[in-house]
Image: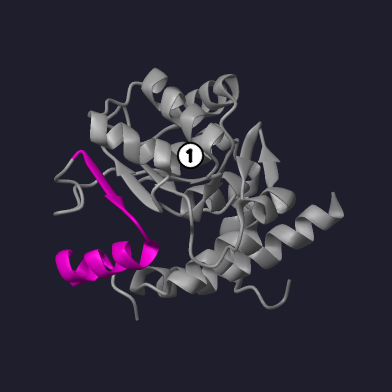
């Protein structure tokens, strides 16, 4: 399977919008959309966990080409806290309750649009990584915090 | 921006000059991750359960273990 690319991100944006599924790019993939220069493997989406949104999400994923067994479909529709998908055209991590972010609505209030892609604010991306406290997060946090400072300053100048 | 190391600042500025499409082409890479990539679907009832699963099942060098 090839790496995630811009065209696939556009497909997520367009198909999710058509189905009315609310989500935010989170994690390093979100930071990259904001301009952070680094590498990552997968796209991480923070999904609003409501019954109607999970239903919309499921249908959007099917349209994108993800294939589910009956049990898997139910788990997506139920909005389990964390779901890893490797059963479609690209890999996708669905996060319904990320570490360090209390409610989807709060993150949505702060979110940023980049070329139509809804992205968590850099402060939420950092908060999530700090709370996860994995070795790989610890390694990336100093540079990510520097990027946050750069991003906020350049954004304020615009 | 004096607190930002010069090398990083130059990288941020260079990235800001690139269009998003190009930034994404540079950013997303694909390498096999043992165990993690071996099933087509995996789900967890809580992030705590996921973190514990990572610590018990993934090789340390992948970096998914908590510090």
- Residue A108 position in % (x across, y down): 68, 48
- Residue B26 position in % (x across, y down): 43, 42
Residue occupying image coordinates x 60% and y 63%? A102
Seen in the picture, residue A118 relative to A128 is either above or below; the reply is: above
Name the residue nearer the viewer: B11 or A105. A105
Seen in the picture, residue B55 relative to A47 is either above or below; the reply is: below
Name the residue nearer the viewer: A149 or B63. B63
Q: Mark 1 points at which residue?
A: B24
Residue occupying image coordinates x 48% and y 48%? A29
Residue lying furthest bottom: B67
Is residue B46 located in the magenta-colored stretch of the structure?
yes
Left or right of residue A50, residue A92 in this image: left
Residue B51 found in image quarter: bottom left
Magenta segment boundaries in residue numbering:
B40-64
- Residue B5 position in % (x across, y down): 60, 74
- Does residue A100 show up? yes
Residue occupying image coordinates x 41% and y 53%? A81
């Amino acid at each position: 399977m090839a790496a995630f690319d811009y065209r696939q991100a556009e497909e997520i944006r367009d198909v999710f919008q058509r189905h009315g599924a609310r989500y935010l790019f989170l994690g390093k993939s979100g930071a990259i959309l904001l301009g952070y220069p680094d590498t990552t493997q997968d796209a991480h989406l923070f999904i609003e966990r409501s019954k109607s949104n999970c239903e919309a999400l499921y249908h959007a994923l099917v349209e994108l080409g993800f294939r589910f067994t009956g049990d898997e479909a139910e788990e997506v529709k139920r909005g389990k806290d964390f779901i890893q998908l490797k059963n479609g055209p690209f890999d996708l991590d669905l996060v319904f309750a990320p570490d360090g972010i209390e409610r989807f609505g709060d993150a949505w209030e702060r979110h940023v649009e980049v070329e139509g892609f809804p992205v968590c604010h850099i402060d939420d991306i950092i908060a999530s990584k700090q709370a996860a406290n994995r070795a790989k997060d610890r390694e990336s946090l100093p540079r990510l915090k520097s990027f946050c400072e750069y991003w906020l300053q350049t954004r304020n100048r615009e | 921006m004096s607190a930002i190391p010069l090398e990083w600042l130059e990288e941020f500025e260079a990235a800001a000059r690139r269009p998003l499409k190009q930034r994404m082409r540079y950013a997303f890479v694909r390498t096999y991750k043992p165990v993690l990539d071996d099933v087509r679907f995996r789900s967890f009832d809580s992030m705590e359960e996921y973190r514990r699963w990572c610590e018990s099942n993934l090789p340390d060098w992948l970096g998914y273990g908590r510090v």
